[in-house]
């Protein structure tokens, strides 16, 4: 299969001997890509009826499996940024028996009062979020958050919408993690070339099962669209490889 041209996946097919599906969301009325991740946001109502993007992704994965490619069922991963990151979480949430691990870059939490709970099962989850990302989509309306609150959009509780639980908290609850976020390991690496120095801090949720790790990579000073370094790409890929299903 031909790998997507998104930089995060360049050479993955050869380096990891992996099959890569480079999927894009439905084109919005404004000309961008959108994903129907939630009853509240990330798809553009002006584009028409809300698409069933979960069914679309499931069909694409099943097509690969049906064609007899040697896919390791313990190593099916999903990654996305912004709305795509929300889609990655939503799909893993609803397909934990299929997805080993999900990586979400720069996306907020999902409202639990509007969306159903995850399907029973565990999946590894990595939330990556920039502290200078001021993008918020609430009920399909773009807005801003003050930088001081942005970490909590993907991490703990989005205080702009108290009914919305963060994806990280949802994943920890889903996986039955008994602990809480660890203290930060600071200055781990330079993830974003637009920010000087090693801006990435990491935290791990304690007490998680062997098939349900939950982690945060906090990018100090990173905005919504980082310029990811080679070290950043390699770190994400290494994290996925290290988190298969048992």
Image (spheres, rainbow, N blue to C red):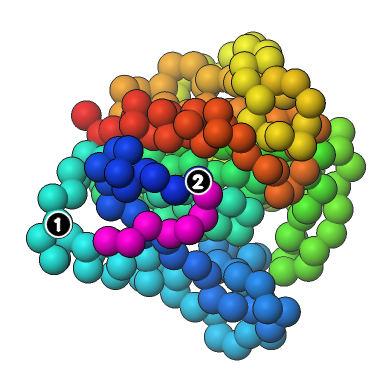
86 displayed left or right of 123:
right
Rate crowding at label 2 as few (under 14), some (14 to 19) or many (20 or more) other CA atoms within 10 Å: some
Span colored in magenta: 1-7
Asked whether residue 162 appears in the rendered view, the answer is no
Image-quadrant location for residue 195: top right
| Residue placed furthest toward the bottom | 48
The residue wearing badge 1 is 69
Vertical position of residue 236 compared to residue 62: above or below: above
Q: Is 178 drawn above or below residue 140 in the view shown?
A: above
| Identity of the residue drawn at 22% across and 39% down | 74
Relative to 211, 225 lies left or right: right
Rendered-image quadrant of the N terminus: bottom left
- Please say whether residue 62 is visible from this viewpoint: yes
Looking at the rendering, in which quadrant would you find the C terminus? Answer: top left
Secondary structure character of the magenta stretch overall: loop
Q: Name the residue under label 2.
A: 8
Q: Quadrant of residue 229?
A: top right
Residue 57 point in image, percent of width and height: 37, 65
Q: Could you say where residue 88 lies in the image, as x and y percent from the top left?
A: 47, 52
Q: Quarter of the image holding residue 189? A: top right
Give the answer, above or below, for where 46 lies relative to 234: below
- The image position of residue 20, as x and y in percent, is 34, 54
Real-space CA distance between mark 1 and mark 2, rounded to the nearest whole angstrom: 22 Å
Residue drawn at (52%, 36%), measured in percent from left and top? 233
90 part of magenta stretch: no
Q: Which residue is drawn at 34% across and 31% down?
A: 241
Q: Where 72 sits versus 91, above or below?
A: above
Dot label at residue 19: none
Which circle's residue, 1 or 2, is located before the other in the chain?
2
Q: Residue at x 86, y 38 (%)?
A: 147
Q: Identify the element where label 2 is drawn.
A: helix
């Amino acid at each position: 299969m031909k790998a997507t041209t998104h930089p995060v996946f360049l050479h993955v097919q050869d380096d990891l001997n992996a099959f890569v599906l480079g999927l894009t969301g439905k084109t919005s009325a404004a000309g961008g890509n959108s994903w129907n991740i939630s009853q509240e946001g990330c798809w553009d109502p002006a584009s028409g009826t809300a698409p069933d993007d979960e069914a679309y992704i499931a069909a694409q994965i099943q097509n690969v499996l049906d064609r007899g490619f040697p896919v390791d069922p313990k190593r099916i991963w999903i990654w996305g940024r912004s709305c795509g990151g929300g889609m990655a979480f939503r799909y893993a949430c609803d397909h934990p028996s299929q997805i080993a691990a999900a990586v979400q870059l720069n996306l907020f939490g999902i409202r639990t009062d509007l969306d159903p709970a995850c399907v029973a099962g565990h999946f590894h989850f990595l939330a990556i979020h920039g502290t200078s990302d001021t993008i918020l989509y609430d009920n399909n309306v773009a807005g801003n958050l003050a930088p001081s609150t942005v970490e909590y959009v993907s991490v703990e509780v989005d205080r702009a919408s108290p009914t919305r639980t963060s994806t990280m908290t949802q994943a920890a609850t889903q996986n039955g993690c008994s602990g809480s976020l660890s203290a930060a390991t600071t200055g781990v690496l330079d993830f974003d070339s637009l920010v000087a120095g090693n801006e990435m801090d990491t935290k791990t949720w304690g007490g998680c099962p062997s098939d349900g790790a939950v982690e945060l990579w906090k990018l100090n000073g990173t905005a919504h669209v980082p310029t990811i370094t080679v070290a950043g790409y390699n770190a994400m890929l290494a994290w996925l490889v290290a988190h298969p299903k048992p």
